[in-house]
Image: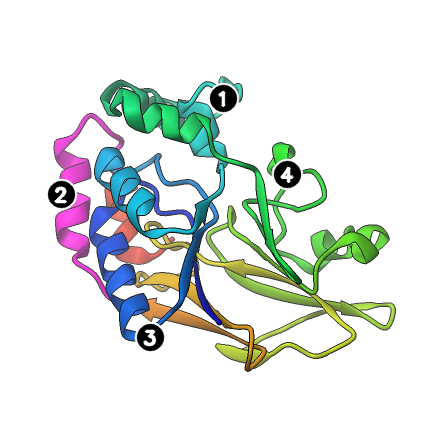
Amino acid sequence: MRIAVISDIHSNIEALTEVLRAADRHKVDRIVSLGDIVGYGASPNECCELVRSVTEVTLLGNHDAAVAGRMDYSYYYDAARHALDWSASVLSDENISWLRSLPYTYRMGEVGFCHGSPVEPKAYEYIFALEQARELTPFVAELPEVTFIGHSHLCKAFAIGNGEVNDVVAQKFGIRRGYKYIISVGSVGQPRDYDNRACFVICDTDARTVEYTRVEYDIETSAQKIFDADLALNFGKRLFLGV
């Protein structure tokens, strides 16, 4: 089975559309979204509706939880908080209800999915460094063989086994038996690894491989929509840089 894992779309319909076209070209069997459909970008309704139509499941990201009234975001910085308020004001009642219904985690056998750390999903803790991955070692027996996460917008993978936690640095790599993997899938709509192309992951459960896939999209159009909306200009400018 080939699974496309997408995350952190952030209301970027141009990026999402190209990612889904790429997933179709790669002949994936299922699509799973790790959440943060909304926030930052200018097309929250379009993204919600497209994700709803194509995914097997979508998880609740922290931005989704914020606009759906499922978490306090008063401590967010001003521009991000304003973007969430704006998103909540333009989202349809149907899409708000859908976001409100989303689960925190999902599992297919030995493949798990979560927006942030799987240990306490509602806390939305980040895992993008070895130190953070090492904090999972007391819980490793409870984890599936592979856990896909989002949240950081970074492409990071960690292998836990034999008493060690190691970085996995490759665009495509195999899943070794006897190890547990935590794989951060990057961002569809707002990459932050200095590559401005949209990013997602393809997991082949039969071949036991994971591959990061990058896709070019119409950044100019996506950014212009942000410039034209009541949103911080930086949310559009950073799309060009991938930061």
Q: Which residue corresponds to mark 3?
A: 26
Q: Which residue corresponds to mark 4?
A: 121
Q: Is residue 28 left or right of residue 47?
A: right
In 3D space, how far apart are the residues under numbered discs 1 and 3 (Cα atoms)?
37 Å
Asked if the residues shown at circle 4 and circle 1 are in contact, with their CB atoms under 8 angstroms apart, the answer is no
Residue 24: horizontal and vertical position, in percent? 28, 68
> Visible in this render: residue 243?
yes
Q: Which is more N-terminal, label 1 or label 4?
A: 1
Q: Which residue corresponds to mark 1?
A: 73
Report crowding for label 4: few under 14, some 14 to 19, many 20 or more residues within 10 A (C-alpha): some
Asked if the residues shown at circle 1 and circle 2 are in contact, with their CB atoms under 8 angstroms apart, the answer is no
Q: Which is more N-terminal, label 2 or label 1?
A: 1
Q: Which quadrant of the figure has residue 20?
A: bottom left
77 in the magenta segment:
no
Q: Amino acid at mark 4?
A: Pro
Q: Is residue 147 left or right of residue 36?
A: right
> Visible in this render: residue 42?
no
Report crowding for label 3: few under 14, some 14 to 19, many 20 or more residues within 10 A (C-alpha): few
Q: Which residue corresponds to mark 2?
A: 224
Q: What span is colored magenta in the figure?
A: 215-234
Q: Which is more N-terminal, label 3 or label 4?
A: 3
Nearer mark to the viewer, of 4 and 1: 4
Q: Amino acid at mark 1?
A: Tyr
All told, the count of numbered labels is 4
